[in-house]
Amino acid sequence: MKKLKTNKLFYGEWPYKINTHINGGNLIKTRGIEYVKKFCTNEHRSPLYKRAIAKEKLFNYVCILETFDLTKIKIRAEYDTVNIFVKDKNLYSKICQALDIYVSSVVEPVNEEELSILLDNNKSVFCDRLPHGIYQYKAIFKSRIPLDVREKLARWLVQYDHSKLLVSNDSLHKLENQKTLWGECFVYVADKNMLILLQLASQGYIRRTEEFIVRSSINTSS
């Protein structure tokens, strides 16, 4: 099992992630556990019936999963990958143990101190080094911004050199594009003062901001 570090809360609230692999796992999310159990016992057919799915293994997986309080976890499934997100450390450990043969990797906070920081500020992102060595913040814009606001923002951004902020060519192109803005567009920002100026220039069209915290800057122990 590969163990990775939690750098930021998943979906803004979940510090633990369990990556599992099970053929047909996406049915758990798209159809629900009861449907999957009936499919595995040949009471239902699935859109994936042409695929080779080991029904006994899938049935065992969902039977284990439903022994836990599903209101206390978040499940995301795609194809044969099922990701389980958890808040409580004890529950996380129990799920890892119960689904051990299906777990491919886990993501967890390095220690209680980092967990506390993440829970106190869900915009925090841990890193070993600041992006490009200098940027303390990342500002992500909303996917739809009025053209006049985008044009003014693009002109404002190019006034500053890389010691203040950094916008990629792709993000700048999206802002300058005459068509409706689609997809994620972001800017790295050097400090708090520059972030405030960016918030004013963007006229409320920043969707969220992230603050980078270098692990060596806090008193942590792995």
Image: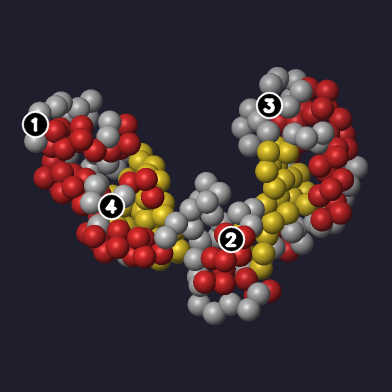
Tag 2 and tag 1, C-beta contact below 8 Å:
no
Residue density around tag 2, few if under 14, some if 14–19, many if 20 or more, within 10 Å: many
Q: Position of residue 151 (x, y in %)?
A: 83, 27
Q: Which residue is mark 4?
A: 68
Can you tell which of label 2 and label 4 is closer to the viewer? 4
Decide: is 178 above or below 12. Answer: above
Residue density around tag 3, few if under 14, some if 14–19, many if 20 or more, within 10 Å: some
- What residue lies at 49% left-to-right and 66% top-to-bottom? 109
Q: Earlier in the sequence, mark 1 or mark 3?
A: 1
- Report, in whole angstroms, how far the alpha carbon at label 1 lies from the one at label 3: 46 Å
Decide: is 203 above or below 5. Answer: above
Q: Which residue is mark 3?
A: 144
- Report, in whole angstroms, how far the alpha carbon at label 1 lies from the one at label 4: 25 Å
- The residue type indicated by label 1 comes to Asn
Q: Which residue is mark 1?
A: 42
Quadrant hosting residue 78: top left
How many numbered tags mark residues here? 4
Q: Earlier in the sequence, mark 2 or mark 1?
A: 1
Q: Earlier in the sequence, mark 1 or mark 4?
A: 1
- The residue type indicated by label 4 comes to Phe
Q: Please, which residue is most extreme toward the right here?
A: 159
Q: Earlier in the sequence, mark 2 or mark 4?
A: 4
Q: Position of residue 122 (x, y in %)?
A: 61, 54
- Report, in whole angstroms, how far the alpha carbon at label 3 lies from the one at label 2: 29 Å
